[in-house]
Amino acid sequence: MSTTPTHSFIAGTLVLATVLVGVVARVGNQTSAAAASGSSVRVAAPSSGPITFTGTLDRTAVLLGKDGLAHIELVMAAAADKEVRQARRPTDMVVILDRSGSMSGNKIEHARAAVRELVGQLSAQDRFALVTYANDASIVIPLSAVDDAQRIRWLDTVNAIQPEGGTNMSDGLDLGLHLIEGSRTSGRVPHVLLISDGLANQGDATPEGLTSRARRAAQGEYMLSSVGVGTDFNEYLMTALADAGTGNYYYVHDPRELAGIFAREFGAARTTVASGLAVQIEPGAGVRVIDAAGYPLEATANGVVLRPGSLFAGQERRIWVTLAMPQHAVGEYDVGRFSLAYGEPPDRHVLTLSNVPRIACVADPDQFYANVDVDAWSRSVVVEDYNKMQEDVAREVKAGRRDRALGRLQQFKDETAAMNAHLGSAAVTDQLDGTSELWIDIDGAFQGPDQEARQKELSKAASAQAVDSRRAGAKK
């Protein structure tokens, strides 16, 4: 039986998930031993509230004259005790739904069903609004609380939505965000969910204009998540909108998945423990922040800040930050300070990692490898390096560049295998063996009469999987 790139890709994803579970299990056992012996490179910020903030370096040395790269895993976690779980926050949920002509058929059918299910989950303390957009945008259901009579009227309104026209996403965002911003009430959790299946082609269709609108959510310290349906939307724009709005991005191949996504986003919003997360990184002298799980990095006076959104009860979010350490002179260097701010003004809290170990630049390769935390390095490879490569591959596939996609995969394999020859991580060995699935997917996407469609599907599936894996714990 032949397999499509997507089927093969799912198999590869299961392999990767199995490997990651094994890494976490091994690390859990070995970290305890490291902490007992005093050799752990994990540090924690003092905390007396429901939020904890920790960091783990994957090495305490870089090699003279090499790339100087080091990783630190930042973990933000919210308490999951009984009291927190039972504290359901009143939520303002605004859905901005694409009803352009391309949404006809099962897309609009399942979108309507997803909205109906969401309406059925609302409590008397919640408020809901529905904005639709095509050639223009309209408020189909104003932001308001629900009762039994209102619920019936809303369901009739949702059932009457029909697809037609173009895709004026900017007007949809303007109306939806205005509903939130015009009715903010203390103690309520605002949340916006944007759905689209195509390219913005009316109104302000520029990526700059659309992301600037989404950024209003970050400025207002609420979340805007985005959902791309099918294979004809721009996944990089939809990811950028979610990033700008400090929310989540979803790729939906099967429209039947919409109801589950709506439920997860609503469930996370109503159990929010900490909103407006902001990770401030103040790197040491000569240190540069290269990446942070793909999140946008905003320059500040002393470094950069990234805004990963909110934390719901029991949530644990993990972000790998890649640093370029000084590597031109032997010596020890301060990594810097890492702070997590959260909460709504004026009740804003800050947790700081101020005792991160220094990283040495050494000339002796044996000394360098001896200062690599194999468990942390394994996680950084399986979670961060692999999925950053997968994002790069997805872009090459989308652009129709088979050889460059395979070349990027081969580069990852060669560089990782060379490092692992010294460190001997079984998890990394397993992960390298699993890359054959991705290789088959890439090669297969450039064969046969339907290769353009297969490339679209593979690029979207691979990029979405990579984003989710690099941002472990971001979704409920």
Image (cartoon, rainbow, N blue to C red):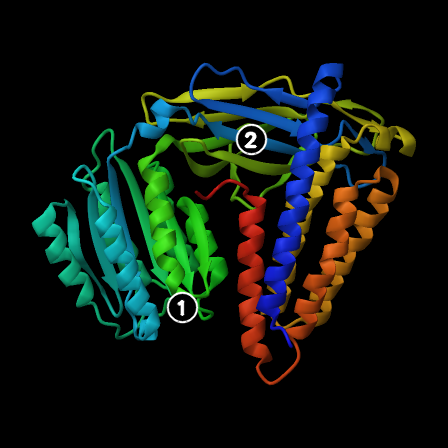
Residue 49, image x and y in percent? 43, 18
Name which residue type carries label 2. Val
Q: How many circles with numbers are drawn on the protein? A: 2
Using the rendered image of the protein, determine whether residue 56 is visible from the camera's viewpoint. Answer: yes
Q: Is residue 468 left or right of residue 20?
A: left
Q: Residue furthest front?
A: 1
State the SS at label 2: strand
Residue 18 vs 397, above or below: the answer is: above
Name which residue type carries label 1. Leu
Residue 377, image x and y in percent? 73, 37
Label 1 packing within 10 angstroms: few (<14), some (14-19), many (20+):
some
At 67% from the left and 74% from the top, the residue drawn is 444
Nearer the camera: disc 1 or disc 2? 2
Residue 315, image x and y in percent? 46, 34
Q: Which residue is mark 2?
A: 75
Residue 385 vs 326, above or below: the answer is: below
Quarter holding the N terminus? Answer: bottom right
Cα–Cα gap, marks 1 and 2:
35 Å
Name the image quarter holding residue 289: top right
Residue 137, image x and y in percent? 22, 62
At 53% from the left and 15% from the top, the residue drawn is 46
Name the image quarter holding residue 312: top left
Q: Is residue 179 left or right of residue 106?
A: left
Q: Which residue is mark 1?
A: 199
Q: What label sits on residue 211 in the rendered view?
A: none
At 34% from the left and 39% from the top, the residue drawn is 269
